[in-house]
Image (tube, helix red, strand yellow):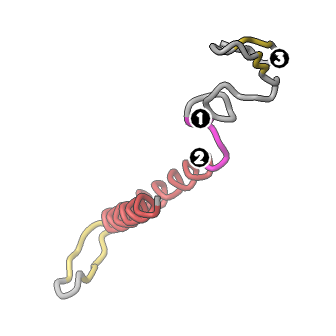
Amino acid sequence: MLVPGEAGRTSDGRVHTMSPNTSTGGSKSGGAGGGLMTPGRVAVAAIAVLTLVFIFENTRSTKIRLLIPEVTLPLWMALLGTALIGALCGAYFVRRRK
C-alpha cells in the first residue's frame, strides 16, 4: 500500500508515486458517509425539534373535516399526522429522483 509522498513499484515493475493530495478512498471528511454534524444535518435536526415542540404545545381539541365526515381530535394529532404524511411524500420523491 502506498503512503502519500512515497514511491512504490507496481506488479509490472513500473514506479508509481502518490502525491500527498491524492486520497486513498473514502470521503473528503475522512469518514464513511461524511461527518456526523454537518451544517445541513444540524439545520434539519433544529427544524425537526422546533416542529415537534410546536405540535405538542397545541394540545386542545379541534374539529377537522376529512372530505365528508367531521371529526374532533387533539390538534397535536392532526399536526403530527400532517407532518408524517409530508415527510413520507418528501422521502418518496427524493428516492424517485435518484
For badge 1, the amino acid type reads Leu
Front residue of 67 and 58? 67
Which segment did they paint magenta?
Answer: 33-40
The residue identified by callout 3 is 5
Q: Quadrant of the N terminus?
A: top right
Q: Is residue 70 above or below residue 50?
A: below
Distance from the alpha carbon under mark 3 to that under mark 1: 29 Å
For badge 3, the amino acid type reads Gly
Distance from the alpha carbon under mark 3 to that under mark 2: 35 Å
Query: Farthest left residue?
Result: 69
Position of residue 59 in the picture relative to residue 71 (left or right) = right
Q: Is residue 42 above or below residue 74?
A: above
* Residue at (56, 55) in percent of width and height: 47
Can residue 58 be seen here? The reply is no
> Mark 1, residues whose alpha carbon is within 10 Å: few (<14), some, or many (≥20)?
few
**Sequence order check, earlier mark of 3 and 1:** 3
Query: At numbered mark 2, what does the secondary structure look like: helix, strand or loop?
Result: helix
Position of residue 58 in the picture relative to residue 18 (left or right) = left
Position of residue 6 in the picture relative to residue 30 (left or right) = right
Marks 2 & 1, CB-CB < 8 Å contact: yes
Tag shown at residue 41: 2
The residue identified by callout 1 is 36
- Residue 32 sits in quarter: top right
Residue 98 at x, y percent in the picture? 46, 58
Query: At numbered mark 1, what does the secondary structure look like: helix, strand or loop?
Result: loop
For badge 2, the amino acid type reads Arg
* Residue at (25, 83) in percent of width and height: 65
Marks 3 & 2, CB-CB < 8 Å contact: no
Query: At numbered mark 3, what does the secondary structure look like: helix, strand or loop?
Result: loop
